[in-house]
Structure formats: C-alpha cells, structure tokens
Amino acid sequence: MIKDPVFLLAYLAGVVGLVFQVARLPALRGLFDRLPALVWTYFIPMLSTSAGLIPDDSPLYRALARYLLPASLVLLLLSSELKAIARLGRTALVVMAAGCLGVALGCMAAFVLLRPWLPSEAWKAAGALAGTWIGGSANLIAVGATLGLSPELQGVIIIVDTVVGYTWMGILISLAGHQDRFDRWNGADRSAVDGVGARLADRKAKSSRPLAVADATLMVGLAVVLTAACLWVGGLLPPVGKVLNQFSWAIIILTTVALLLSLTPLSRLEEAGASTLGYAGFYLLLASVGAQGDLRKVASHPQFVLFGVIVIVVHALLTLGAVRLLRAPLFFFGAASQACVGGYSSAPIVAAIYQPAMAPVGLLLAVLGNVIGTYAGLLVAQALSGLAT
C-alpha cells in the first residue's frame, strides 16, 4: 500500500495526468463522451483504495483540502461574472431548499422503513446524517455531540457519508454529460446560465494570451498569499456555535476577497489562463476525494448503507422535482445536490463541471447548507425520537 504522502501525491497526480491524456485519443472518444475524464479521475482512486493500493485516510488528503482547495478557488473566482451569477439567485435558492427538504424527509422515510433492523440510537444517527448531508462534516460532529451519539454509530455514519456520498458525487459528475439533452426535454431556460459561460468564452477568445512567467508567478503568488492570509485571519476569529469554525471563516473570507478581486484589473489574469490552473488543482483535489471512498466498508453495515441510499433517492426526487417545476437547467440540480451532500470542499468542483463559470454558485450554496445543517439535523432527530420510543 502507498502510504508515504509524497508517493501518494505522485500516484494521484499521475492518475489525473494520464486520464486527461488518454481522453484525447481519438479511438477512445466515444468512451469518454459517455464517461467523461472527470468520472475516471474520481473513480480510479476510489477503486484503488477499495483494492488496498492506497489508504482511505492520509495527512495528504487533509492537506489538499486545507491548502489546495482555497488556492484553487482563488484562481477560479477571479473570473467570476458577479452580475450574471446574481440573476441565478432565486432559482438556486429554491432548488437548494428542495434538496435540503429531500434530505430531511429521506432520513425520516429511511428510519420508518428500516426501523426493525436499526439499533435504538438510530434516531440520533439519522439526525447526524441529515446534518452532514445538508451541511458538512462539522455539522455531523456538532449534531452527534449535541445528541450524545456513540462513537461507534458516528463512525458508521461517516462510512455512509463517505461511500454513499462519494458514489452519488460520481453519479452527478456523470450526469453533467447529459445536461443538454435533459434541458431540452425539460424546456429549461438556459439563457442566464449560458450567458455567463458565453461571456467568459467571449472574453477568452478576444483577450486570451500565452501564459508568461510574470503571469504564472503572479497567479501562484496571489493564490498562496491569499490562502495563507485567510487561514491566518480565520484562525484569529472565534467559532460561532459548533458549525462556523476557523476553517469555515477562512473559506468565507477568501471567497469574499476573491470575488471582490474579480472586479479589479487582477481579473485579467483569466486572459492568461488563471481558471485553467485553478481547475488543474481542483482535479487533483477531486482525485483525493475519490481516494477516501472505500467500497469494502459497504458490507460491514448494510442496513445503514441502505439507509443512506434511501435518503439520496428521496433527496434526488425532490430536487429534480423542483428543477422540473421551475423549468430550470440540470446545472441547478447538480450544484444544489452536491452543495447538500458534499459541502464546500466539492460543490464548486461539481458546479464547475456542469458550467465552468459557475463554481461560485456551488460554493455559496454549500456555505448556506453549512449554516443551517446543524439546526436541520437536530430537528430531524427530534422528530424521529418520538418514533423511537
């Protein structure tokens, strides 16, 4: 097993590089049209973990999430079209609300259906799962600590969150390749979404320039300095409740500063490919996320894995229902669903896979979910506690 962080990083970087090179081969174009390179970038590390080649937990994964995520976000957010993105607000919020409601109702439905096979503390576990799939890992810990969830069951929920949640992320990535067909069937109004992408593409076509050393060093310097500064400032701020921790503060501050910088001449770094460099970092992060999913753990707790599957199904149905009623593009389904289930470490990735200019939408929805996740998890637990007696 590859445990050394340096060799593990080399393996993941090699997978990402090889996948994108193979995807360019004309003979395999049909395969990669059906299963895009990003799907392979995600699932090959997951299969490697399941085969015992690499670990599902490593200091490298935590380091990438803490340092590479914010640095990549800086480079992506520099090209943000804020005015156009603001027009998506109502639709994004309604679909996100449907996704959150779907998780809550899914936990209740799964509890009722599987109650004979669940332990007595399952209502607490359901609340913790609702917390993490509306918010994030911090919400899971906050709900679990508040309810007095046993370490054993908390570990089980982490397995469900990892295996089922990461598998769902892979499905969302796969669906991105079918969004045009879905949007035609749904009669979706893509004008706002396409407008953002068109403006970004037009800006690249008219103003793109070769990457110079001066541009590259400014990009790297800006990303690293802003990441370090925001992590430092976030570390000085007090936690708010049990959810808004120091890293959450850092991400919020970094997002705000990077969005403001997109209104300055620094946004012209996009002409030299700032977002391309940001995406490269995101793809490496995506590989590390996939590596944390170990399919071997499914067999250990089948009833809770089934519990998670039921929650995802209900969540998906309600979120898709909102997209259908609003005649919204499939992009909103992918962004809102991953904002719920994945949180801010992966929601911008999925949003950007659907629409390259839309990473900020996924990030902002995930921050919203992080704020309400603990409250939602506690409400679900309270509702189910009556059924458990």
Image: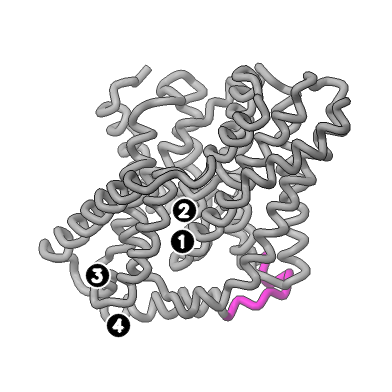
Identify which amino acid the numbered label 1 is placed on: Ala
Q: Which residue is mark 2?
A: 349
Q: Position of residue 122 (x, y in %)?
A: 75, 26
In the displayed structure image, the side of residue 379 where residue 131 appears, left or right? left
The span from disc 3 to disc 4 (Cα, nearest Å) is 14 Å
Secondary structure at badge 2 equals helix
Q: Label 1 neighbourhood size at 10 Å, few (<14), some (14-19), many (20+)?
A: many
Q: Label 4 neighbourhood size at 10 Å, few (<14), some (14-19), many (20+)?
A: few
| Residue 269 numbered mark, or none | 3
User: Would residue 176 be visible to someone looking at this image?
Assistant: no
Q: Seen from this angle, which residue lies furthest left?
A: 213
Name the image quarter holding residue 271: bottom left
Q: Position of residue 221 (x, y in %)?
A: 18, 56
Identify which amino acid the numbered label 2 is placed on: Ile
- Quadrant where the C terminus sits is top right
Q: Is residue 160 above or below residue 32?
A: above
Q: Are marks 3 and 4 in contact (CB under 8 Å)?
A: no
In the image, residue 198 lies in the stretch drawn in magenta: no
Identify which amino acid the numbered label 4 is placed on: Lys
| Residue 3 numbered mark, or none | none
Q: Which residue is mark 4?
A: 206
Q: Position of residue 49 (x, y in %)?
A: 47, 25
In the displayed structure image, the side of residue 118 where residue 375 appears, left or right? left
Q: Is residue 103 above or below residue 276?
A: above
Q: Which residue is mark 1?
A: 359
